[in-house]
C-alpha cells in the first residue's frame, strides 16, 4: 500500500493580497523555499515530495507517522509567515490514496478559510509489513537533440507541458498520479499499474503528442528507494542495456 | 522593449546520473533552491524569474547589464555543484526576445555538452528610455469553490495544468509567453498584446477548458513594477471594482 | 551517554582560494546555508547542530546511526560544491565525546588534505537504553535593558563574545562544551555536570565579565527534547517562577 | 567614508518564547537562513553583511540608498515570520558609523518593544565621490597544522574565539570593528587605520593569545571590492609573495 500526504498552505490566497498584493518575486521565493524545505524534511525519513501546485504539495510518506508529520508542521510555523495543514491517506493505488488525503484536509475546513489552521488529519498509516511504493521515472527520448538545442526555450516548454498534461490525464485514469520534476522528466506514483498497462499509457501519450516516452519503474518498501530503482531503470534504458521502453526494478526479495 | 534572459544549467542531464543516478529528493531540493536564489538575485535588480523547466529558467531582466549577470553567474558557481550559462535578448515581444536569448545560448554550445561552461552571450540590452514591460497576471475564477474544496487534489491539478498548456499555446501565437506561478495563477510576459487581443485569447482558453479566466495587465518600466500593477489589477477584478475580465494598469506617465 | 558528531568540510581552505579567492559574500552564504541545512537534517532525527566555526560544525546526534549520517553526507555532495567528512564519538561527558569524534576525523586525514574526501568514521554509537543528553541554555540577565538598547551594537557584541569565551573555557574544564546560539544566548552540552557545579561555573564567569548569567538545564533521551526542557527552565527563571539562577528539568521517568 | 547598516529583528526575544519556547533547531535554521538571505540581498548591490549576533546583523552598505533598504525590509516581511528594523550611519571610521546606526535604531524604539516594527532610519548616506571602504581579512598562521589537525575540535574553537574577542577589543579602540567569518578567519572594517597601526594591534593580540596573525588590507569604493582586495592580499602573504604580516591593496587610482 502507498501512503500519500497532501500538504496545503492555510488561507494562502487571501494572505498573498493582505494588506495589498505582495511582491511576486517574494512569493515565488517563499514557495520555492517551502518546497525545498519540505523535500528535506520528508526526505530525511525516506519520503519524497512533489511541488504539484506549490500551495498544495503531494508527498509519498510511507514509513512516517503522526509525530513525524507534527514535527514538520511545527517547524514550518516557526520559520515561515504561513502555516500548513496536512491530510494523510493510504490505499492500493496512488490516485485513491490522494483522494482520501484530500478528504482528510477538506473535512478540516476550506483552503481559504481564515479559521482553519494546522489541521493534521490522518485517515490511516501504512504499517511496515504492507509498505510498498511503485514510482515510474518517465522522460522524453532525446529531448536535447530534438528540442532544447534546436527549438526556442519556450517552444520546448510548450511540448514538455503538453506531454505532462497528457500523462496526468492518462495516469489518473489507471489509478496513478504524475508530476513534473524538471527538464523533460516526470515521476508517476503508480502502485498496482503493471509494466504492460504503463507501456500502453505511454504509447497513447506518444501518439497524442508526437514524442517518444520511456520509463524506469522502481518498486520498494520506501518512496526514496523506489525512486532510486526507477532512476537506475531509466538509466539502463538510456544506455541501451534494455531493449524496451519500460523496465521494472524491484529491490524487495 | 522587453529584455529576456534564458538561464540554463550546464550539462545538467549527464551530471544528474554521474557516477550513478543522484537521489531525486536531493535534485528536487537543488532545483528549488537554485530557482529561489535566482529569484532573489534578479529580484534585487527589479527583475523576475520564472522556473519554467527548472534546468532552463526564463527571466525578465530589463535594467540589468553584463556585470549584473556576471555577478550572478559567479555566485552560483561558488555555491552550487553546477554552473549556469545565460543568453540575453531584447525585442518588441516577449516571444521574440526569448527566441533571441535561446539562440545566444545555443551558439555557445549544446545543453549536454561537457565543454560548454558559463557562457554569457548578450545579443542586446534594452536601454533605459526604451524599457517597457507588460505582464498579465491570470487566474481561474473561484478555483477554491469550484475545484480545491470539492475535487481531489490531483483532479484540481489536472485542470490547472490543462489551462496552463492551453495558455502557453494561445499566448505564444500572439507573441506572448506564459508561466505557472503556483495555485491557479499564471504570469504572461505580453508586450504589445492589447487588452482586446488578450481577452480573446483567454476566452478561447475558457471555451477549450471549461473554466473562466480573468487577468490584470500591468505595464511599467521594470518587470517587478509591471508585476505589481498586474497584481493590483487582478485584485480589483476579484473585488468587483471592475466589470470586465481584463484590466490594464500602467504606472508610466 | 552523549553522542557527538564532528562535521568538517573537506579541504575547504584551499577550495576558497582556487583558482583565485572566491567572493566573501558567496562564502558567507554557502556557510550559512550549509549550517541551516545540516540543522534541518539532524533536526529531523531529534538531533541538534551548532555552527561552531562553520567549517567545523558540532552536532549532538543521539539516536542517529550510520545510515542516517550517510544519507546526510550524500545529500550535501549532491547540492553543494563541497563535501563533508564526519567523525562520531560517545562518552559520559560532551567534552570527551567531541574529543573522540575529532580523533575519528583526524585519522581519516588532514582538514586540508586534497586526498581526504567524505570520511565517515564512527567510534561508537549510544544505544537507546544508555541515551541521555543534558543541555544548559544560558543567557545574560536583562541584556536588552543593560546593553542592546543603550550601548552601541558593537560594544554589546564585545561583551557577548567575552562572555562566550569565558563560558567556553570554564565549561571545557568541567567536561562541558558551549556554543553561541545568537542574541545573548548560549547552549552548553553538559552531561554529568550537576546544577551546583554549573552554578559555580556561571558565577566565575559573572565575576570575570561583570554580567549576571542564568541557565535552564534540560535532561532527556534526545538532544531536541533536552533543549526543549532547557528552554522551559530558562523561561521559568525569566518569569520569576524560580528563585535561583539555575534549574533542572528532566522529562525522563 | 564608510556606511554601516545595523539590522535588528523586531521584538525577537519575546517571539521566540510565544506562546511557549520554540524549538531551538527551528530558531537556528531561521537565523542562519535570514543571515544567508540578507547576505544575498546586500551582496547584489556590492554590500557585505556580518552575522554579528544573528538578531543584530551589521552590514557595510556603501552605494545603497533608502529604496534598496526598503525593498529588503519588505522582502523579509513577505518571507519570514518576523520583521526587521534598520538604522544607517556614515562616518570616517567603522566604529563611529555603527554607533550612529545604532542610535538610529534605538530612537525608533527598544529591541523588545512590541510596538516597534520595521523602523528604517537613515542618518546619512555616503555619496559616490566620498565612498571608500577599508576591510582587513585576518587569519591565524597555520591553524590547520597547529590546531585543527592536532587539537580537539572544541579546543581549537576556544582559541579561535579567544582571538576573536581580543581582536574585537583591540580594533574597537582604534576605530575599527571585527567579525568572525568562519574557520580561523576574521574581517575587520577598518577605515582610517593605517597598516602600521593595524600591525601593532595584531601583535598585541599575538602576545595576548599566543598565535601569529596576518592580514590582507583591501581598499576600494565598495565593500565587496574591498573584501576582494583584502582576500588577494592575504593570499599573497600565505603564498610567501610578501615578507610582512600585513599588506595593503587598493584598486582605486
Image (tube, coloured by chain):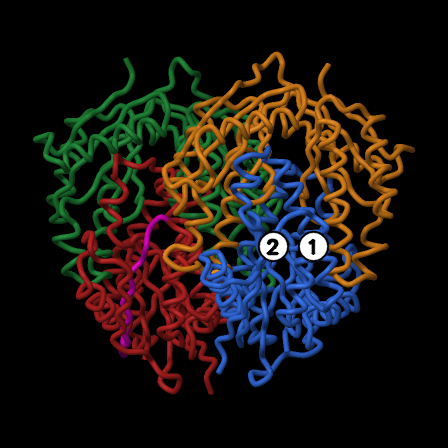
Chain colours: A orange, B blue, C green, D red
Q: Which residue sits furthest right?
A: A243
Q: Position of residue D27 (x, y in %)?
A: 35, 42
In the picture, the disc for residue D86 is none
In the picture, the disc for residue B205 is 1
Q: Nearer the viewer, residue C27 or A22?
A: A22
The chain that hosts pointer 2 is B
Label 1 close to label 2 by CB (< 8 Å): yes
Q: Is residue C231 above or below residue A14?
A: above
Q: Is residue D83 above or below residue B223?
A: above
* Segment tinted magenta in the rendering: D81-93
Q: Quadrant of the N terminus of chain D?
A: bottom left
Which SS type dominates the magenta stretch? strand
Q: Nearer the viewer, residue C106 or C73?
A: C73
For disc 2, the marked residue is: B213
Would residue A86 be found to the left or right of residue C169 on screen?
A: right
Q: Position of residue B232 (x, y in %)?
A: 47, 64
Q: Residues within 10 Å of mark 2 (few under 14, many from 20)?
A: many
Which residue is pictured at 70% across the width and 62% down the height?
Answer: B171
User: Is residue C21 shown to the viewer in this render?
Assistant: no
Q: Residues within 10 Å of mark 1 (few under 14, many from 20)?
A: many
Tell me, yes or no, whether the highlighted magenta stretch contains residue D85. Answer: yes
The chain that hosts pointer 1 is B
Q: Secondary structure at mark 1?
A: helix
Tell me, yes or no, whether the highlighted magenta stretch contains residue A78. Answer: no
Q: Nearer the viewer, residue A230 or C112?
A: A230
* Residue C139 position by quadrant: top left
Q: Nearer the viewer, residue B197 or D175?
A: B197
Q: Secondary structure at mark 2?
A: strand
* Residue A231 position by quadrant: top right
Q: Is residue A90 above or below residue D2?
A: above
Q: Position of residue D216 (x, y in %)?
A: 42, 69
Amino acid at each position: 500500500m502507498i501512503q500519500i500526504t497532501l500538504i496545503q498552505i492555510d488561507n494562502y490566497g487571501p494572505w498573498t493580497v493582505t494588506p495589498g498584493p505582495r511582491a511576486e518575486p517574494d512569493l515565488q521565493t517563499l514557495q520555492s523555499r517551502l518546497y525545498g524545505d519540505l523535500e528535506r524534511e520528508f526526505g530525511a525519513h525516506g519520503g519524497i515530495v512533489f511541488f504539484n501546485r506549490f500551495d498544495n504539495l503531494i508527498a509519498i510518506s510511507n514509513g512516517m507517522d503522526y509525530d513525524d508529520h507534527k514535527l514538520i508542521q511545527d517547524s514550518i510555523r516557526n520559520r515561515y509567515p504561513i502555516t500548513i495543514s496536512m491530510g494523510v491517506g493510504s490505499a492500493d493505488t496512488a490516485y485513491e490514496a490522494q483522494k482520501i488525503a484530500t478528504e482528510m484536509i477538506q473535512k478540516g475546513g476550506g483552503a481559504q478559510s481564515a479559521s482553519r489552521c494546522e489541521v493534521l488529519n490522518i485517515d490511516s498509516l501504512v504499517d511496515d509489513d504492507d509498505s510498498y511504493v511503485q514510482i515510474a521515472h518517465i522522460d522524453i527520448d532525446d529531448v536535447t537533440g530534438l528540442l532544447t538545442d534546436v527549438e526556442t526555450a519556450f517552444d520546448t516548454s510548450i511540448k514538455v507541458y503538453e506531454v505532462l498534461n497528457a500523462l496526468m490525464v492518462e495516469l489518473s485514469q489507471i489509478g496513478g498520479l504524475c508530476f513534473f520534476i524538471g527538464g523533460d522528466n516526470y515521476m508517476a506514483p503508480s502502485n498496482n499499474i503493471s509494466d504492460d498497462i504503463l507501456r500502453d499509457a505511454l504509447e497513447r501519450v506518444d501518439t497524442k503528442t508526437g514524442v517518444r516516452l520511456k520509463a524506469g519503474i522502481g518498486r520498494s518498501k520506501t518512496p526514496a528507494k523506489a525512486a532510486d530503482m526507477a532512476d537506475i531503470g531509466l538509466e539502463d534504458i538510456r544506455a541501451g542495456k534494455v531493449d524496451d521502453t519500460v523496465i521494472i526494478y524491484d529491490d524487495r526479495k
